[in-house]
Image: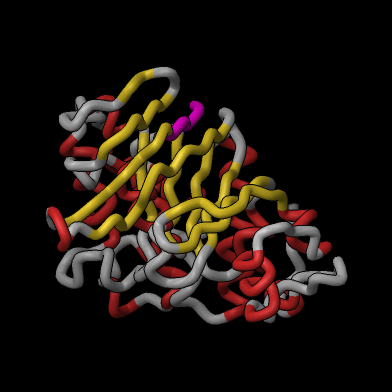
C-alpha cells in the first residue's frame, strides 16, 4: 500500500498566533518501501506521522493511502489498514492490563474473532512466548514492552506501519534487536513503513529514502547511502550529520549497530 502526501499542513492558533507545526509537506512512499523522516525535536516529523494516522482531524492538504484520499472521518477499514507504534512502550501500554488484554482488545473492537489464536500468533511473531501473555507492563523489560506494542499493531494485519521513534527509549543493544525485528516483519508481510527519528543511524538502517525536516518543512530528501557518505546539499542536513555521532559520514558502519550484529 502506497502513501502519498500533498502539501500537508498542520497549524495551531489563528492570525498572529498561528503556528505551523508542519507546512506544505509532500512525499511519496511506494508499496513495501520504508521511508524515514529525520530531524531534531520540534521539527514537525511526529506531526506528519499523526496526520497520516488520522489522529489530527484538522490537517490540511491531501493524505492518499493506496490511491484513496483520506477524509477527516475515516472508515473502520481505513483505520485498520494503518497502525502506529509509539515512542514510549511503557506509556503506550495500559498499566493495569495484561499483555493478553492489550492484544485482545483491538481484535474485539474490529470483530475479527479467533482472539486466542491471533494473540498467540502475534506474540510469536515478535519473539515473545506464552509466559509473557499474562504479564503486566511493569513485569516486562523495555524491549519486551516495545515488542508487545508492535504485536498490538500487527494483530490487525495492517498494510502500513507508522513508527514514531520506536527505539529511542531503549538501550543500544535492544535498539538493534528491535530494528532487526522491524526489518524482518517488513520483508515477511510486505509492509509499507513510515518512520520518524532524531537518530540518523537508526533511520538509515531501516529506511532507503529519507526526508530531513526542519521548522515544519522538508528541507532535503536523500538516501541512506548518501547520508552515510556525507553527500548532502542542505546546510541543516550537514549540521545534523555533524551533531549526530551515530552516523559515520566516511561511509563506515553505523556505531549504533556495533553492539549487536544486524541481520537482514
Taking the spot 48% from the left edge, 71% from the top edge, the residue there is: 40
Q: Position of residue 249 (x, y in %)?
A: 80, 71
Answer above or below: position of 213 versus 48.
Answer: below
Q: Judge from the rendering whether residue 178 lies leftward or rightward of residue 41; answer left or right.
A: right
Along the viewing direction, whichever of 134 and 231 lies nearer the viewer: 231
Along the viewing direction, whichever of 249 and 157 lies nearer the viewer: 249
Q: Judge from the rendering whether residue 62 lies leftward or rightward of residue 236; answer left or right.
A: left
Q: Position of residue 29 (x, y in %)?
A: 55, 35
Q: Position of residue 195 (x, y in %)?
A: 50, 53
Q: Position of residue 234 (x, y in %)?
A: 66, 60
Answer above or below: position of 125 versus 166.
Answer: above
Q: Which residues are magenta?
A: 1-5
Answer above or below: position of 161 versus 29.
Answer: below
Magenta: main secondary structure equals strand
Does the image show residue 182? Answer: no
Asked whether residue 187 is drawn in magenta, I would say no
Q: Judge from the rendering whether residue 130 lies leftward or rightward of residue 94; answer left or right.
A: right
Answer above or below: position of 190 versus 58.
Answer: above
Labels in figure, total: 0
Scheme of colours in the image: secondary structure
Taking the spot 83% from the left edge, 62% from the top edge, the residue there is: 229
Q: Residue furthest top?
A: 67
Quadrant of res 95: bottom left
Quadrant of res 116: top left
Along the viewing direction, whichever of 121 and 8 lies nearer the viewer: 8
Does the image show residue 254? Answer: yes
Q: Judge from the rendering whether residue 71 lies leftward or rightward of residue 89; answer left or right.
A: left
Along the viewing direction, whichever of 200 and 242 lies nearer the viewer: 242
Taking the spot 53% from the left edge, 33% from the top edge, the residue there is: 28
Taking the spot 69% from the left edge, 47% from the top edge, the residue there is: 208
Amino acid at each position: 500500500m502506497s502513501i502519498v502526501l500533498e502539501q500537508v499542513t498542520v497549524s495551531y492558533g489563528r492570525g498572529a498566533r498561528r503556528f505551523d507545526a508542519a507546512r506544505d509537506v509532500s512525499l511519496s512512499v511506494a508499496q513495501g518501501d520504508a521511508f524515514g523522516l529525520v530531524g531534531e525535536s520540534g521539527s514537525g516529523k511526529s506531526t506528519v506521522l499523526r496526520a497520516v494516522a488520522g489522529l489530527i482531524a484538522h490537517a490540511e492538504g491531501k493524505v492518499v493511502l493506496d490511491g484513496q484520499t483520506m477524509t477527516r472521518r475515516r472508515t473502520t477499514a481505513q483505520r485498520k489498514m494503518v497502525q502506529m507504534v509509539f515512542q514510549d512502550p511503557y506509556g503506550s501500554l495500559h498499566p493495569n492490563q495484561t499483555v493478553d488484554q492489550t492484544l485482545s482488545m483491538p481484535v474485539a473492537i474490529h470483530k475479527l474473532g479467533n482472539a486466542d489464536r491471533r494473540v498467540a500468533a502475534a506474540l510469536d511473531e515478535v519473539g515473545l512466548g506464552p509466559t509473557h501473555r499474562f504479564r503486566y507492563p511493569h513485569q516486562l523489560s523495555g524491549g519486551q514492552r516495545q515488542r508487545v506494542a508492535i504485536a498490538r499493531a500487527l494483530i490487525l494485519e495492517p498494510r502500513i506501519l507508522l513508527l514514531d521513534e520506536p527505539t529511542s527509549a531503549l538501550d543500544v543493544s535492544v535498539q538493534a534487536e528491535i530494528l532487526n525485528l522491524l526489518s524482518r516483519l517488513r520483508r515477511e508481510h510486505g509492509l509499507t513503513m513510515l518512520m520518524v527519528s532524531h537518530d540518523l543511524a537508526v533511520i538509515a538502517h531501516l529506511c532507503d529514502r529519507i526526508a530531513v525536516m526542519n521548522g515544519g518543512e522538508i528541507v532535503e530528501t536523500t538516501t541512506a547511502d548518501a547520508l552515510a557518505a556525507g553527500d548532502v546539499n542542505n546546510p541543516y542536513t550537514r549540521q545534523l550529520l555533524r551533531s549526530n555521532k551515530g552516523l559515520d559520514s566516511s561511509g563506515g558502519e553505523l556505531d549504533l549497530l556495533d553492539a549487536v550484529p544486524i541481520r537482514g
